[in-house]
């Protein structure tokens, strides 16, 4: 049975999707890995992937199974599923329909992986609450700014209420490096991550995917 890791944040714009794809790439060096973008209203992780094989739907008499798409990043294959593979348009769904769709996908997609990474939506919306029922552990992505920390703490409260352990946090945009002299430059409030959560890595502002420590 695969281990399910949710990548969460309190707000958008923290680089959570970039971190999710980077984690999948790192793990895919040694394991079979899947990436599941469950941000129904803002799915965009497919934009960072090279989809080499589309998903497939196998219909049975009483149910259906979805074979996930296959993506490739730096020569490493990653199984992938997202609502964006079906439609990138606005979805005017009613309350409850988001969580129903997430539930249906969890029960229909046939993953063959050691690790499944969930690129979760920001905040504490219904689709996240539904998905967290399937999660073994969460990883928090934050930026060193006070407003981002306020929102991240709300997400941490939700994880605590649902008894989902937090393995640690990536502090994204922790600094930039001057290309001329190599000096580290603070980009935000010069604060650290969320107190009490182990820091996995401080990620600099870089172009492309960062190389992440996933041990």
Image (cartoon, helix red, strand yellow):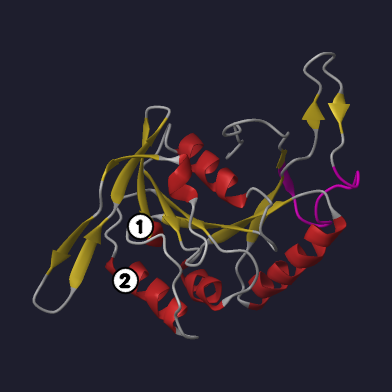
Q: Is residue 192 magenta?
A: yes
Q: Which residue is mark 1?
A: 1
At a point 48% along the width and 49% down the height, the residue shown is 45
Q: Is residue 170 magenta?
A: no
At a point 76% along the width and 49% down the height, the residue shown is 143
In the picture, residue 123 is in which quadrant? Answer: bottom right
110 sits left or right of 11 in the view: left
The picture places residue 211, in percent across and down from the top left corner, at: 59, 31
The picture places residue 84, in percent across and down from the top left corner, at: 39, 58
Q: Which residues are magenta?
A: 188-200
At a point 68% along the width and 72% down the height, the residue shown is 160
* Outermost residue to the right: 190
The picture places residue 91, in percent across and down from the top left corner, at: 44, 72
At a point 71% along the width and 67% down the height, the residue shown is 156
The picture places residue 8, in percent across and down from the top left corner, at: 62, 59
Q: CA distance from mark 1 to mark 2?
A: 14 Å
Q: Residue 107 got which mark?
A: 2
Secondary structure beneath label 1: loop
Quadrant where the N terminus lies?
bottom left
In the picture, residue 165 is in which quadrant? Answer: bottom right
The reply to whether the C-beta atoms of the residues labelled 1 and 2 are less than 8 Å apart is no
Quadrant where the C terminus lies?
top right
Secondary structure beneath label 2: helix
Q: Nearer the viewer, mark 1 or mark 2?
A: 2
Pick the residue in front: 207 or 69: 207
How many marks do you count on the picture? 2
170 sits left or right of 76 in the view: right
């Amino acid at each position: 049975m695969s281990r399910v890791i949710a990548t969460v944040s309190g707000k958008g714009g923290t680089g959570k999707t970039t971190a999710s794809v980077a984690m999948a790439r790192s793990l895919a060096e040694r394991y079979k890995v899947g990436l599941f973008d469950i941000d129904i209203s803002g799915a965009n992780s497919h934009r960072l992937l090279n989809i080499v094989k589309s998903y497939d739907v196998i219909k049975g008499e009483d149910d259906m199974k979805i074979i996930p798409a296959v993506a490739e990043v730096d020569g490493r294959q990653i199984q992938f599923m997202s609502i964006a593979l079906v439609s990138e348009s606005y979805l005017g769904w009613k309350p409850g329909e988001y969580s129903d769709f997430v539930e249906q996908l969890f029960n229909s997609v046939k993953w063959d992986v050691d690790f499944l990474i969930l690129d979760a939506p920001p905040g504490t919306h219904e689709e996240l609450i539904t998905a967290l029922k399937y999660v073994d552990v969460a990883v928090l992505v934050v930026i060193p700014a006070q407003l981002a920390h306020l929102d991240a703490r709300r997400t941490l409260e939700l994880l605590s209420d649902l008894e989902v352990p937090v393995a640690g946090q990536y502090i994204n945009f922790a600094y930039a490096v001057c290309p001329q002299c190599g000096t580290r430059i603070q980009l935000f409030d010069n604060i650290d991550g969320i107190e009490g959560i182990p820091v996995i890595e401080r990620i600099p502002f870089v172009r492309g995917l960062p190389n992440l420590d996933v041990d």
